[in-house]
Image: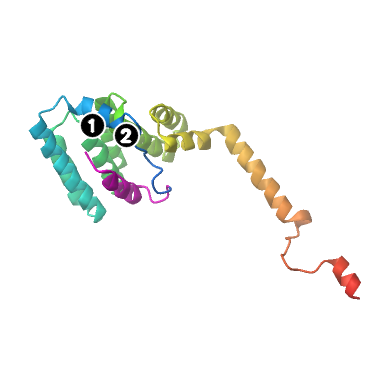
């Protein structure tokens, strides 16, 4: 399992436009949920797979995505029933522009995770982001809803952005603020003298 620092670095690399630390929050119960899922595997093999994932994370930190993908693939070959490495590899594939491959891995991660724990939540959010970029808002919304139910604040933010009423309110608010800044089409300049002040000076 990646350390919180590893996850934070991966987040910064994979999601440069998302506020640092907001992408995937560690929730109470995550450790227990992951332990339950990982308890199915031999501890020795699990440790090897986790070490390979850590190596993949380190490669990603160095922006060496080819090595990262290789390490994640080795972890998958070692434990093909474990969701985490599929999710990590999907993120690296997405960065390399292989959206199809990323979606295949994310679908696998969602299925293997049982839509639970950190891996399930991350896979849903990542898949939702890709679907949203593809203009498939309805499908993206479903993934974000499930991720939000698993405790992802980032998914909750995405649901707000996908809400047509919220979008309309944002547009109306932006228009109103623009009118306040520029009444009658004239931009207010801070520090400029008013006609009343000019009259007094005259």
Mark-to-mark CA distance, 1 and 2: 9 Å
- Asked if the residue at tag 2 contacts the one at tag 1, i.e. Cβ–Cβ closer than 8 Å, the answer is yes
Residue at screen point 33% across, 46% down = 11
List the single residue furthest toward the left.
44
Quadrant in which the N terminus is drawn = top left
Query: For the image shown, how many numbered marks are present on the structure?
Result: 2
Residue placed most toward the observer, 139 or 114? 114
User: Considering only vertical position in the picture, is 98 above or below 107?
Assistant: below
* Image location of residue 161, percent across then percent down: 52, 37
Q: Which corner quadrant of the image does residue 113 belong to?
A: top left
Residue 38 counted in the magenta span: no
First to last magenta residue range: 1-18
Residue at screen point 15% across, 43% down = 52
* Image location of residue 7, percent across then percent down: 29, 44
Q: Circle 1 — which element? A: helix
Residue 8 counted in the magenta span: yes
In terms of sequence position, does the residue under pointer 1 or pointer 2 come before the other? 1
Answer left or right for 81 relative to 22. left
Residue placed most toward the observer, 31 or 121? 31
Mark 1 surroundings within 10 Å by alpha-carbon count, few (fewer than 14), some (14 through 19), many (20 or more): many
Q: Which mark is residue 83?
A: 1
Q: Circle 2 — which element? A: helix
Residue at screen point 26% across, 28% down = 32
Q: Which corner quadrant of the image does residue 109 belong to?
A: top left
Q: Which residue is mark 2?
A: 123
Answer left or right for 34 relative to 140. left
Residue placed most toward the observer, 126 or 137? 126
Q: Which corner quadrant of the image does residue 85 belong to?
A: top left
């Amino acid at each position: 399992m990646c350390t919180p620092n590893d996850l934070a670095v991966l987040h910064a690399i994979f999601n440069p436009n998302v506020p640092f630390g907001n992408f995937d929050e560690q929730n109470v119960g995550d450790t227990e949920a992951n332990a339950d899922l990982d308890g199915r595997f031999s501890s020795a093999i699990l440790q090897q797979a986790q070490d390979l994932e850590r190596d993949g994370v380190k490669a990603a930190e160095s922006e060496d995505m080819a090595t990262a993908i290789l390490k994640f693939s080795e972890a998958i070959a070692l434990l093909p029933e474990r969701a985490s490495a599929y999710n990590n590899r999907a993120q690296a594939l997405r960065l390399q522009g292989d959206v199809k491959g990323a979606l295949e891995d994310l679908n696998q991660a969602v299925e293997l995770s049982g839509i639970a724990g950190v891996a399930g939540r991350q896979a849903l959010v990542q898949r939702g982001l890709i679907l949203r970029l593809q203009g498939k808002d309805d499908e993206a919304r479903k993934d974000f809803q499930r991720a939000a139910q698993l405790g992802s604040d980032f998914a909750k933010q995405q649901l707000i952005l996908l809400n047509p009423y919220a979008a309309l309110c944002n547009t109306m608010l932006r228009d109103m603020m623009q009118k306040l800044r520029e009444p009658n089409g004239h931009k207010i300049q801070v520090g400029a003298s008013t006609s009343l002040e000019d009259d007094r000076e005259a």
